[in-house]
Amino acid sequence: MELKDIKAIIDLMKKNSITEFELEEKDSKLRLKRGLNGGPQPAQADDSVPMIPAPMVLAAPVVPTVAAPVATGEVDIKSPMIGTLYRSPSPEASAYIEVGSEVNPDSVVCIIEAMKVMNEIKAEVKGVVTQILIENGKPVEFGQPLFKVRPS
């Protein structure tokens, strides 16, 4: 498991008030536990996985969801986590946004499912959607551009 994946799991734990997380794969096991007061504790792992120093995990930089404007004047709405992207709240419902949709910072643009938790992703920018960069139901990576928006 890569450090960025562990950071994404820690962020999900904080965001969803999860105090313990355990992931077991065929040859490794990762166990994360947060303190009772909500403060993070160092990650714990069994002997088959090299221990990641706690300061590296705890000092994870906060990466903004919206990137700085590029030369075209558009900004990217990026994925704040790894998971599966859904463009609508249910399979029968229409998509949250389409190309040409106006969004504001509080507009929900999609849902990313991570660890069976549905996370609403907001635009965090005011403008018009110019491109949709990922298909419905496809996996996304942390920091991956999802939509392009022309700020207004």
Image (spheres, rainbow, N blue to C red):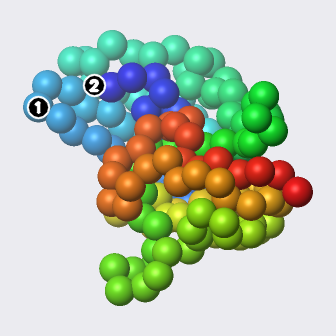
Where residue 58 appears, as percent x and y from the top left, is: 63, 28
Q: Is residue 59 above or below residue 18?
A: above
- Looking at marks 2 and 1 on the same chain, the residue that comes earlier in the sequence is marked by 1
Residue 71 located left or right of residue 129: right
**In the rendered image, is residue 4 in sight?**
yes
Q: Secondary structure at mark 2?
A: loop
Q: Is residue 115 visible?
A: no
The residue that appears at 56% across and 25% down in the rendered structure is 57
Q: Give the SS element for disc 1.
A: loop
Which numbered tag is attached to residue 46?
Answer: 2
When the figure is inspected, residue 86 is found, relative to residue 33, above or below; the finding is below
Nearer to us in this view, 77 or 54: 77
Compute the Cα span from label 2 to label 1: 13 Å
Q: Nearer the viewer, residue 130 or 16?
A: 130
Q: Residue 50: which quarter of the image?
A: top left
Residue at figure coordinates x 56%, y 36% from the top left: 143
Q: Amino acid at mark 2?
A: Asp
Where residue 60 appears, as percent x and y from the top left, is: 64, 27
Q: Nearer the viewer, mark 2 or mark 1?
A: 1
Q: Amino acid at mark 1?
A: Lys
Residue 91: percent from left, percent from top? 34, 79
Quadrant housing the C terminus: bottom right
Picture layout, residue 31 above or below residue 100: above
* In this rendering, position of residue 129 left or right of residue 18: right
Going 27% across and 25% down the picture, which residue do you hit?
46
Is the residue under label 1 in contact with that under label 2 (CB below 8 Å)? no
Q: Residue furthest right?
A: 152
Classify residue 31 as left or right of residue 147.
Answer: left
Which quadrant holds the N terminus?
Answer: top left
The numbered disc on residue 26 is: 1
Q: Position of residue 33 (x, y in %)?
A: 47, 43
